[in-house]
Image (cartoon, grey):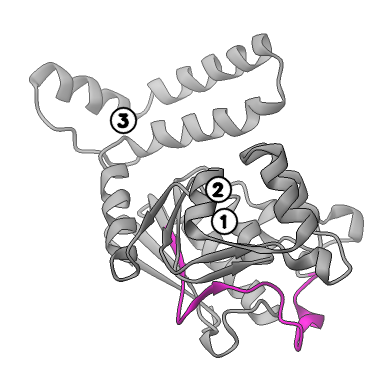
Amino acid sequence: MGDAATFQLDGHVATITYNRPEVLNAINGEMRRDLNEAFSRFRDDEDAWVAVVTGSGRAFCVGADLHDGAGSTGEFAGTFWEKPTLNSFESGWEIFKPVIAAVNGYCLGYGLTLVSWCDFVVASDRAEFGVPEARLGVPAIVAAIRLPQRINWADAMELLLTGERIDAERALTMGLVWRVVPHDRLLDEANALAQRLLGGAPLAQRVMKEIAMRTRSMASLEAIRFGETMRHVAAATQDAAEGRRAAAEHLPPRWTGR
């Protein structure tokens, strides 16, 4: 992995950092590769249970690097038809571990697309959000899919069709942000949430997140059948046995993620 995005594991919490502060963490080809590698490492590392994603410097991510944009798309293998999308590197990830976005500043374009994929968005009171593509003459494809699924229709259309920025409090009101905190407390608050999440059984959490994601496009009966199948699989894990033992003995469980 290069230096454009970094991965650090502390216990069971991985911190993934956009790391091109000199260009406000704009996405180029190097950062795409580094981010894909960082999230693949998070997905595959059995000791990594929760991720916190943030940016170095005064931005989370301002979107594509307009001065080095040639390498910011097309990093997937295969033909055009085999690529999930040219424009959103995270659209092909199947990661069901909890992910927290700690938004420390400007969060625009690609940055907002990533945030719309995260489970929790904790924002600095200095953060700003926006989808500037309408003002650049090109559509924001994945943001146009995700935002109406995550927030009120008119709020999504405001972001998509005006290209204007909103502050953290407005993003909170929209439901785009889960919590706004003082800037100097941002990582402390994100890591405190990560520690709370570590109190739950990691495999059970992943099953529930996968059920929540996959069943959005299923009819109710099919969704329930899928969920029951997943429950039977999860019930056979070591963590499920540990949860039953700990509850019976009135002791805190010791999760292993197995």
Q: Residue at x 46, y 67 (%)?
A: 54
Q: Residue at x 61, y 58 (%)?
A: 114
Q: Position of residue 168 (x, y in %)?
A: 49, 59
| Cα–Cα span, label 1 and label 3 | 33 Å
Tell me where the magenta segment starts and ends, as one range: 52-74
Mark sitting earlier along the chain (2/3): 2
Check disc 2 and give the amino acid type: Leu
Q: Which mark is residue 176?
A: 2
Q: Residue at x 78, y 81 (%)?
A: 69
Check disc 1 and give the amino acid type: Val
Side of 212 where 53 appears, left or right: left
Q: Is residue 192 above or below residue 130?
A: above
Disc 3 designates what residue? Answer: 238
Check disc 3 and give the amino acid type: Gln
The answer to which image quadrant residue 189 occupies is bottom left
Asked if the stretch drawn in magenta spans residue 22, the answer is no
Badge 3 element: helix
Residue 258 visible to an observer of this rendering: no
Label 2: few (<14), some (14–19) or many (≥20) C-alpha neighbours in 10 Å: many
Q: Which mark is residue 115?
A: 1
Q: Position of residue 50 (x, y in %)?
A: 39, 51
Q: Position of residue 244 (x, y in %)?
A: 23, 20
